[in-house]
Amino acid sequence: MSTDQRIREEARLIILRLLSERRDETLNSNIIVRELAEVYGIDEERAWVHGEMEYLRRMGAVTMMEAATVKVATLTELGRRHIDRKVAIEGVKRPSRAED
């Protein structure tokens, strides 16, 4: 697997986790771009992040809507199940097990 593919899979997992941490499980792409860069060191353009969000939408892990130039993603039940390690979504890094 290429480094680019690893970064994409990691970013997709991070996006799902960011959504899962919100009470309403919803975030806009501007916030996701900033979190990926500042917290996780994945410094990519908004268009790149939109592509990863779109991948997650196609896989059924999020729903999305557009608000002007940003996209707003909401975690789905499938996305939650991936975070909880109950299913594995192709192309999204598998979460590590919670330590006891």
Image: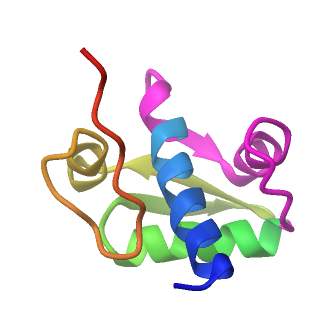
Between 23 and 16, the one lying in front of the other is: 16
Q: Position of residue 24 (x, y in %)?
A: 44, 28
Q: Residue furthest left?
A: 86
Q: Where is residue 66 in the image (x, y as percent from the top left)?
A: 63, 63
Q: Is residue 81 left or right of residue 15?
A: left
Between 37 and 72, the one lying in front of the other is: 37
| Vertical relation: 10 (above or below) 28 | below
- 60 within the magenta span: no
Q: Residue at left 48%, top 26%?
A: 21
Q: Quadrant of the C terminus?
A: top left
Q: Residue at left 70%, top 47%?
A: 32
| Vertical relation: 20 (above or below) 65 | above
**In which quarter of the view is residue 67 placed?**
bottom right
| Vertical relation: 53 (above or below) 33 | below
Between 81 and 63, the one lying in front of the other is: 81
Q: Where is residue 49 in the image (x, y as percent from the top left)?
A: 70, 66
- 32 within the magenta span: yes
Report the magenta residues as a range.
Answer: 19-45
